[in-house]
């Protein structure tokens, strides 16, 4: 999805499948989709155990926060995009059933965010 959006905005050019295979999105998407949350807030616990990706267990909390960042000095990028970024974070509790999105009430739409910005002025 991120690569498709980058192509639509003109930040990447080329065939979608090739851009994904070449990881061309990494220029603007340098992180993963999230991390553990815990007492230290960030990166608590191991992501792999015995060389295998860790299986979620009830009680674990993690973020889901893909973000795009366009550095100020990005060459080949229209000036209007430079020095911008976006990330919307959800914090999720793993349960024995459906996961619980702890940040479900956080504003995410453009209208909700703009409304908060106006209210804060």
Image (cartoon, rainbow, N blue to C red):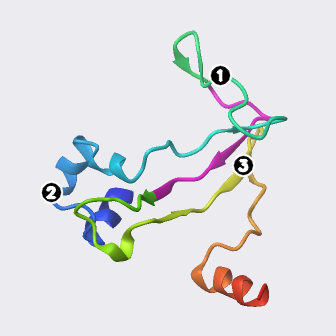
- The residue that mark 3 highlights is 92
Contact, mark 3 vs mark 1 (Cβ under 8 Å): no
CA distance separating discs 3 and 1: 17 Å
- Give the number of the disc on residue 66: none
Residue 77 lies, in percent from the top left, at: 27, 66
Side of 93 relative to 22 (left or right): right
Side of 84 relative to 26 (left or right): right
Which residue is rendered at x = 67% and y = 82% of the image? Answer: 112
User: Which label's residue is closer to the chain start, 1 or 2?
Assistant: 2
- The residue that mark 1 highlights is 46
Residue 1 appears anywhere in the view: no
- Determine the secondary structure under disc 1: loop
Magenta-drawn segment = 55-68
Which residue is rendered at x = 74% and y = 69% of the image? Answer: 106
- The residue that mark 2 highlights is 15
Which residue is rendered at x = 59% and y = 44% of the image? Answer: 34
User: Which label's residue is closer to the chain start, 3 or 2?
Assistant: 2
- Against 98, residue 105 (above or below) is below
């Amino acid at each position: 999805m991120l690569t498709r959006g980058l192509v639509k905005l003109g930040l990447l050019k080329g065939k979608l499948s090739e851009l994904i295979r070449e990881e061309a999105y990494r220029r603007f998407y340098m992180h993963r989709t999230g991390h553990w949350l815990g007492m230290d807030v960030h990166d608590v616990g191991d992501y792999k155990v015995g060389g295998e990706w860790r299986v979620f267990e009830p009680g674990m909390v993690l973020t889901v926060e893909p973000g795009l960042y366009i550095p100020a000095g990005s060459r080949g990028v229209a000036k209007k995009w430079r020095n911008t970024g976006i990330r919307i974070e959800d914090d999720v509790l793993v349960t024995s059933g459906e996961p619980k999105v702890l940040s479900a009430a956080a504003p995410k739409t453009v209208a909700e965010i703009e409304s908060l910005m106006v209210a804060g002025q």
